Image (spheres, helix red, strand yellow):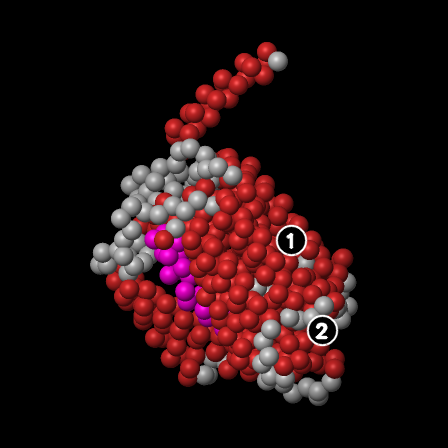
């Protein structure tokens, strides 16, 4: 009893010193983490969960292959083009307001898509999911950023959040397969109602609603430039995937989109209340994290799409078995995220961790180029998957933590939006480039050969290997760039950086 009594004042004194340095702890912080992680899981799931259900939906509703592509593209277009606005909305009107609005809207949009009687309603529902996801995702991450200010708790929270963000795509493949195979394709959409309902109750109960004093006005010209530019950029890359790089729509959209984004950058230096204050990406570690998430978004596409094709078309796995095959990668990612963010990041900083994760990503991708018609899962697929999972864990959690580290509280939403925007646009570029390169490799292999099942299978293998090699190249570029850009040593904010908040 005496020991407990003597420890209490010391604990209180230590807590008081921490509160003085970092600010008082937010009540129910771990419940906030649970709510935020659920919200992020729902957004990330929907990037892949519906993909596995598309063949069943197409057979049920009788739509064309062209319409099928729009079910995926509508979500990506709305999500990618509106993220920055969603992040600024959270800064201006409060995290809880944005989070609750995003959760409620996402649930309604999922219900609309789930009961769709035709492909038009399904596409509209997916677009609305993307719109509310763009409000939800940055609000969730910024709520986490402003809740966990004490370094040890912050690192644990971002380890969990980074693992959810990195593993959500693979979990989506498994859950999509299970729901489609044992229930119905519509349940890949209805499942969001349960997730959104639980997160909505938690958000109302536990998430505080910080609003800046004086609430600055929204940058309308910047909003128009950013939304239109991002929309055209994502649309251009999606057209390249569908129609090839010879499509005029592709190049016109890409060129106009890049011009508008250049004007957006110029305008942000002159706007009184900029949508994206340049102090946000201007801090060195933060800028490196945004770039790292962009490159990882592009490179990771090779795993989820082409390895899924390989397991289903070559190894003849069912959708459920394919999803289960990704689980070891998810486990490796979660372990690496915990070790990297809780143990290593506070001691060595992001410079050795993120570049090492990029290097492991490149090794895993190159390893997968050796997969052939006779490869087995345990001997040939599992080892590179584990390497990839560990590498992604070293990237996602530390990069997400550093992307919002030290940002001013009033900029937390737009900084969080930049993380998601970089990953989303990177994924769109990866989708278009890798799909185009893979199709070219398959066509070159089959040229001059008599059509047969074996030739088709070998052509597919060549296309997958080409995608893996280019994904590896993305990760090598990311490794070099992040090594050069990240500061050495434990995380700290440059006091001379614009808008820095010492932590």
Q: Residue at x 50, y 60 (%)?
A: 104
Q: Residue at x 48, y 52 (%)?
A: 140
Of 83 and 311, which appears nearest the observer? 83
Name the quadrant of the C terminus: top left
314 vs 103, left or right, is right
> Is residue 86 inside the magenta stretch?
yes
Q: Which residue is mark 1?
A: 330
Name the quadrant of the N terminus: top right
| Residue 369 horizontal/vertical position (percent) | 65, 65
How many dots with numbers?
Answer: 2
- Nearer the observer: mark 1 or 2; the answer is 1
> Is residue 83 inside the magenta stretch?
yes
Q: Give SS at disc 2.
A: helix
Magenta residues span 74-92
Q: Residue at x 29, y 41 (%)?
A: 496
Q: Give SS at disc 1.
A: helix
Q: Which residue is mark 2?
A: 313
Nearer the N terminus, badge 1 or badge 2? 2
Of 338 and 441, which appears nearest the observer? 338
């Amino acid at each position: 009893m005496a020991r407990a009594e003597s420890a209490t004042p010391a604990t209180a004194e230590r807590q008081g010193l921490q509160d003085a340095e970092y600010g008082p702890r937010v009540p129910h912080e771990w419940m906030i983490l649970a709510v935020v992680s659920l919200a992020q899981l729902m957004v990330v799931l929907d990037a892949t969960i519906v993909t596995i259900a598309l063949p069943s939906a197409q057979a049920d509703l009788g739509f064309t292959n062209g319409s099928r592509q729009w079910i995926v593209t509508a979500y990506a277009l709305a999500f990618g083009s509106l993220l920055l606005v969603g992040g600024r909305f959270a800064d201006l009107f409060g995290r809880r307001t944005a989070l609750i609005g995003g959760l409620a809207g996402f649930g309604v949009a999922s219900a609309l898509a789930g009961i769709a009687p035709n492909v038009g309603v399904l596409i509209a529902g997916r677009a609305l999911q993307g719109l509310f996801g763009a409000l939800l995702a940055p609000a969730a991450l910024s709520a986490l950023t402003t809740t966990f200010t004490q370094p040890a708790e912050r690192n644990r929270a971002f380890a969990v959040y980074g693992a959810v963000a990195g593993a959500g795509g693979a979990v989506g493949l498994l859950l999509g397969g299970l729901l489609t195979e044992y229930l119905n394709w519509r349940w890949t959409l209805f499942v969001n109602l349960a997730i959104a309902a639980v997160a909505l109750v938690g958000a109302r109960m536990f998430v505080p609603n910080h609003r800046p004093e004086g609430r600055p006005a929204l940058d309308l010209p910047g909003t128009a430039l950013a939304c239109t530019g991002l929309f055209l950029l994502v649309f251009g890359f999606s057209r390249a995937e569908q129609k090839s790089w010879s499509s005029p729509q592709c190049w016109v959209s890409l060129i106009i989109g890049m011009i508008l984004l250049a004007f957006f950058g110029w305008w942000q230096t002159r706007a009184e209340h900029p949508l994206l204050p340049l102090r946000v990406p201007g801090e060195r570690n933060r800028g490196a994290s945004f770039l790292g998430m962009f490159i990882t978004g592009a490179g990771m596409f090779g795993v989820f799409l082409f390895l899924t094709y390989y397991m289903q078309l070559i190894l003849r796995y069912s959708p459920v078995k394919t999803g289960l095959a990704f689980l070891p990668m998810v486990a490796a990612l979660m372990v690496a995220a915990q070790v990297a963010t809780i143990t290593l990041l506070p001691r060595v900083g992001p410079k050795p961790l993120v570049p090492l994760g990029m290097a492991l990503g490149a090794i895993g991708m190159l390893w997968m180029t050796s997969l052939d018609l006779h490869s087995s899962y345990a001997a040939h697929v599992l080892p590179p998957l584990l390497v990839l999972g560990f590498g992604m864990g070293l990237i996602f959690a530390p990069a997400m933590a550093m992307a919002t580290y030290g940002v001013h509280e009033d900029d937390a939403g737009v900084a969080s939006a930049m993380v998601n925007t970089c990953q989303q646009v990177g994924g769109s570029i990866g989708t278009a480039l890798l799909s185009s390169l893979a199709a070219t490799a398959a066509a070159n292999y089959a040229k001059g050969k008599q059509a047969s099942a074996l030739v088709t299978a070998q052509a597919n293998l060549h296309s997958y290997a080409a995608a893996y090699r280019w994904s590896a190249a993305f990760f090598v570029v990311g490794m070099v760039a992040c090594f050069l850009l990240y500061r050495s040593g434990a995380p700290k904010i440059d006091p001379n950086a614009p808008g820095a908040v010492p932590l």
